[in-house]
Image: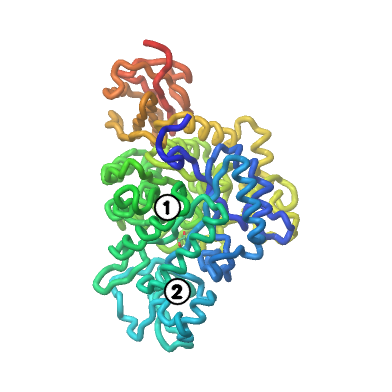
């Protein structure tokens, strides 16, 4: 069942790191042919869209976010024929494919930068150059663990260049119309190949202006509008997902008027608060941020996630909250990176299934389109001994054989986690065999969500709860309504919950886990007062019953 909203409102996304997914040619690196081999698995999860981390040529000093050629495929991953084959294979299975569009910067290896640093004709000001590294002093450094400044001196040109991320990732100069036009050509190239959309990386930082923090500038919005109009003319149905790691009020303008900028934007600040709510056993952090989340144009959508390929970012929390989160989730220094926590979902939950389920139940009922990070559906672990964010980007664990079904190479590009999360213990094949596995539960969760147009395309409200441990979400869309109740506490809870909006309607308890005494799947109750009885970290979804009262 779907709503009448744009297709991506009812979608579930799967974030997939090509290097880590499946190595078809046996060189130790995952590749596009490998992804094709595993597309049935992805389809069977019930997701609709596969988001591929960057796939273009790159020296890989930032895992491909340092692009050295925007219109080709990294040789480790295959070539453009492989990419087209992937699109065909995905589309045959009803899956869409998007990939990262890194607009803000290139690798310093990119021929554009090489030409610019030599002041080559026409490329002289494609990047942001200066003699004065005191410029734009109000812009923060993002990669605080590795960069001391946003300026780096280039010996070749004898000037400083601007970079919001690593020093090997010089920012493009969007004041230059040739840069804007070159990046539109990149977009056209991928759309012409048949790609279904993009995740637009790091878009708040496209322009710099003195006296500002160089984020969210009006010039940036003007360019994004120009880009959206350009894309609409080629592929009006494209999924465009903007990465804007900002407070909701600063993110809102990126939706534009609903039709002229980004249709989808990550909701960054809700993510750490879901984790904080779990740590505190209280729904209040979730309520706090949702109360501060403005209404968005009905044609647009938030995109929600629990984990991704980066550190669990703590940029959008207070110093006090960050200290609490570090203390709770990252007790060892090796678990911390920049302003965040470099651990995967299952280890952050101490591999405890009730917490993993609860978080995903919240994810699937929050307002927005959810993303699952590859491997989290089987509870994969991490390796905090690996540098940077590599510990959460280890190879997918398909089985317990040599190379874990990821590669026949004896030297996969990264080691598998050891101990209880090693492939012998955590792998897809074992999860397929066990009817009670997390994987089977995830499939049921996703299928249940997709049965309800209210989740995704509907209207969301977080209801007042008689007990602060309970997060109560109501989503409605035409004849569909879902009340989802999540017990953040590590102890049972029992309340009678009034849902005035559904007064007189009959609800049935359709999906849940760790239900308390007296609550059973299939039980019917009058909506005026839902008898809610949840065990520790329990959750229950109620929906309108077809049975007449
Ligand atoms: C990506 C990171 C990357 C950075 C610089 C981010 O938003 O998610 O993985 O390092 O952009 O491109």
Q: Which is nearer the eye, 392 or 333? A: 392
**Image height check: is 204 above or below 303?**
below
From where the camera sits, is residue 331 visible? no
Query: Within 10 Å of the Cα at label 2, are there few (<14), some (14-19), or many (20+) other Cα atoms?
Result: many
Q: Position of residue 58 (x, y in %)?
A: 57, 68
Residue labelled 1 has its Cβ within 8 Å of some atom of ligand 1? no
User: Gap between marks 1 and 2, in whole Å?
Assistant: 29 Å
The residue singled out by tag 1 in the image is 232
Which is nearer the N-term, disc 1 or disc 2?
2
Residue assigned mark 2: 170
Residue 293, above or below 156: above
Q: Is residue 386 above or below residue 438?
A: below
Q: Look at the numbered disc 2 and say if its residue's Cβ is closer than 8 Å to ligand 1.
A: no
Q: In what element is the residue under mark 2?
A: loop
Pick the residue in front: 459 or 221.
221
Residue 61: which quarter of the image? bottom right
Residue at disc 1, secondary structure: helix
Q: Which mark is residue 348?
A: none
Q: Image quadrant of residue 212?
A: bottom left
Locate residue 427, reporting x and y percent.
65, 44
Q: Which x, y percent locates residue 213?
A: 29, 68
Which-is-in-front pick, marks 1 and 2? 1
Residue 261, image x, y percentages: 35, 54
Residue at 35% x, 72% y is: 175
The count of marks equals 2
Horizontal arrangement in the rendering, residue 232 relative to residue 405 (left or right): left
Q: Would you call the spot at circle 1 few (<14 residues within 10 Å), some (14-19), or many (20 or more)? A: few
Q: Nearer the viewer, residue 383 or 79?
A: 79
Q: Residue at x 48, y 33 (%)?
A: 450
What residue sits 26% from the left and 23% below the top? 500
């Amino acid at each position: 069942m779907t709503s009448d909203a744009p297709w991506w409102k009812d979608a579930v996304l799967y974030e997939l790191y090509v290097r880590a997914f499946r190595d078809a040619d046996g060189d130790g690196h995952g590749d596009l042919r490998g992804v094709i081999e595993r597309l049935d698995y992805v389809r069977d999860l019930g997701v609709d869209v596969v988001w591929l981390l960057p796939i273009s040529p790159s020296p890989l000093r930032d895992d491909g976010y340092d692009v050295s050629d925007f219109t080709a495929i990294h040789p480790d991953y295959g070539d453009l024929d492989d990419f087209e084959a992937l699109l065909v294979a995905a589309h045959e299975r009803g899956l869409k494919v998007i990939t990262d569009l890194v607009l803000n910067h290139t690798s310093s290896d990119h021929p554009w930068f090489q030409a610019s640093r030599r002041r080559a004709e026409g490329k002289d000001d494609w990047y942001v150059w200066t003699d004065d590294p005191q410029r734009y002093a109000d812009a923060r450094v993002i990669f605080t663990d590795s960069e001391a400044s946003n300026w780096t001196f280039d010996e070749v040109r004898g000037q400083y260049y601007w970079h919001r991320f690593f020093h090997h990732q010089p920012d493009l100069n969007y004041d230059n119309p040739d840069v804007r036009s070159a990046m539109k050509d990149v977009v056209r190239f991928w759309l012409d190949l048949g790609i279904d959309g993009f995740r637009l990386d790091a878009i708040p930082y496209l322009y710099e202006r003195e006296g500002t923090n160089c984020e969210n500038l009006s010039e940036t919005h003007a360019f994004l509008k120009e880009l959206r109009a350009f894309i609409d003319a080629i592929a009006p149905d494209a999924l465009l997902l903007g990465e804007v790691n900002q407070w909701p009020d600063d993110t809102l303008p990126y939706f534009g008027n609903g039709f002229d900028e980004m249709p989808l934007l990550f909701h960054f600040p809700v993510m750490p608060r879901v984790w904080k709510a779990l740590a505190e056993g209280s729904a209040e952090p979730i309520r706090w941020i949702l109360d501060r989340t403005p209404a968005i144009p009905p044609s647009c959508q938030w995109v929600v996630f629990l984990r991704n390929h980066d550190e669990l970012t703590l940029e959008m929390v207070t110093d006090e909250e960050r200290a609490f989160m570090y203390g709770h989730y990252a007790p060892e220094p090796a678990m911390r990176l920049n302003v965040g926590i470099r651990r995967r979902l299952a280890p952050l939950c101490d591999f405890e299934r009730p917490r993993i389920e609860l978080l995903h139940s919240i994810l699937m009922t929050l307002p927005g389109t959810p993303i699952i990070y590859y491997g989290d559906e089987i509870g994969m672990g991490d390796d905090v001994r690996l540098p940077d964010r590599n510990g959460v980007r280890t190879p997918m664990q398909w089985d317990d054989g040599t190379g874990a079904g990821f590669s026949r190479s004896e030297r996969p590009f990264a080691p598998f986690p050891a101990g209880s999360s090693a492939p012998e213990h955590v792998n897809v094949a074992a999860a397929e065999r066990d009817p009670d596995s997390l994987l089977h539960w995830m499939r049921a969760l996703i299928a249940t969500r997709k049965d309800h147009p209210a989740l995704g395309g509907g209207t969301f409200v977080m209801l007042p709860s008689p007990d602060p441990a309970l997060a109560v979400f109501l989503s409605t869309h035409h004849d569909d309504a879902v009340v989802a109740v999540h017990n953040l506490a590590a102890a049972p809870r029992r309340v009678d919950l009034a849902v005035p909006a559904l007064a007189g309607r009959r609800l049935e308890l359709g999906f849940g886990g760790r239900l308390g005494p007296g609550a059973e799947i299939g039980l019917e109750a009058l909506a005026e007062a839902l008898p809610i009885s949840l065990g520790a970290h329990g959750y229950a979804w109620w929906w309108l019953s077809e049975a007449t009262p």
